[in-house]
């Protein structure tokens, strides 16, 4: 089993959101479900503010920016 830590949690939400934004295999994209994953990352950011290492904070905010931009792009199409 891989180590379960803050990084794993953030990457799990991010990877799920990316899969939902793009669709995978026979599974179509689901922008509403992707928005839920992005919102959960935002809740995590809000609730952990001031309690993260610099690396954890950087990872979390990079994931949020990446996903918010990707969601905006998908909605424009």
Image (tube, rainbow, N blue to C red):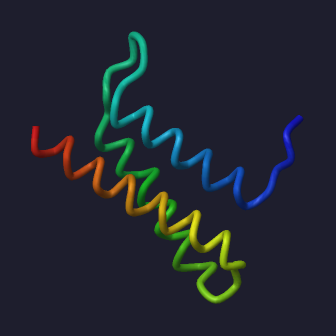
Decide which of 66, 19 is in the foreground and name it: 66
Residue occupying image coordinates x 51% and y 48%: 14
Q: Which residue extends farthest left?
A: 76
Relative to residue 58, is residue 20 drawn left or right? left
Q: Which residue extends farthest top?
A: 26
Residue occupying image coordinates x 44% and y 32%: 19
Q: Examine the image and state in which quarter residue 23 appears.
A: top left
Residue occupying image coordinates x 61% and y 49%: 11
Residue 60, how many percent across, how many down? 55, 65
Q: Quadrant of the C terminus?
A: top left
Residue 38, how many percent across, how many down? 42, 56
Decide which of 25, 63 is in the foreground and name it: 63
* 47 over 66 or under it: above or below: below
* 29 over 13 or under it: above or below: above
* 69 over 30 or under it: above or below: below
Q: Examine the image and state in which quarter residue 58 appears.
A: bottom right
Relative to residue 32, is residue 10 drawn left or right? right
Residue occupying image coordinates x 82% and y 50%: 4
């Amino acid at each position: 089993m891989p180590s379960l830590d803050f990084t794993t949690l953030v990457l799990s939400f991010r990877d799920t959101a990316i899969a939902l934004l793009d669709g995978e295999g026979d599974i179509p994209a689901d922008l509403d479900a992707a928005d839920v994953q992005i919102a959960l990352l935002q809740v995590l950011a809000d609730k952990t503010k001031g309690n993260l290492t610099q690396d954890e904070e950087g990872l979390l905010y990079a994931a949020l920016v990446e996903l918010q931009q990707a969601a905006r792009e998908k909605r424009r199409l």
